[in-house]
Image: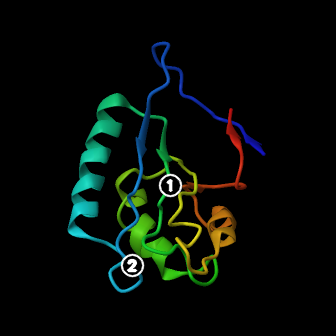
Amino acid sequence: AALPLVVRPVASDLAVVAIGDWGGDDDEEPTTESQRLTAVGLTRKALELDASLTMLMGDNFYHHGIHGADSSSRFRDTFEAIYARLLPGRPFYAFAGNHDYGEGRMANISAQVAYSKLSEQWRFPSLWYKIQ
């Protein structure tokens, strides 16, 4: 599926920030100090560049993805409370990494896709998509 990308008219460039391997530790420790510090740095750079969007390059939920449904507390604890709250109203386009598929254990990658319907900022419309 292709998603429309609405860009505010600025100079002539599109500014994007990206982060990978950002997904906390595990269900018992869904956020880490390193993650919180990285989120602050990412936010500073996004605001400095006036980035229109953030790309989440995979390994969104360590160590073995989401266990359960799109209502998993990991979305709130690992994404919404750490990244989304620092850049309100800005979209985050997610892509899956090996840990999101379970890294050898059962995981629910479909929950990450389904969460797009519940979050104002999380964008993961299908496993393969284009940002346009």
Q: Secondary structure at mark 1?
A: loop
Q: Residue at x 50, y 13 (%)?
A: 12
Q: Which mark is residue 77?
A: none
> Local crowd at mark 1 within 10 Å, few (<14), some, or many (≥20)?
some
The one of 6 and 79 positioned closer to us in this rendering: 79
Q: Secondary structure at mark 2?
A: loop
Mark with earlier residue (2, 1): 2
Q: Residue furthest right?
A: 1
- Could you tell me residue 99's position as x and y percent? 50, 66
The one of 36 and 97 positioned closer to us in this rendering: 97
The quarter of the displayed image where residue 117 is located: bottom right
The quarter of the displayed image where residue 23 is located: bottom left
Circle 2: residue type: Asp
The quarter of the displayed image where residue 100 is located: bottom right
Answer above or below: position of 93 versus 80.
above
Q: Which mark is residue 58?
A: 1
> Local crowd at mark 2 within 10 Å, few (<14), some, or many (≥20)?
some
Circle 1: residue type: Gly
Q: Residue at x 64, y 69 (%)?
A: 109
Q: Residue at x 26, y 70 (%)?
A: 32
Instruction: Locate the C terminus and report the quarter of the image it occupies.
Output: top right
- Could you tell me residue 16's position as x and y percent? 45, 33
Q: Which mark is residue 26?
A: 2
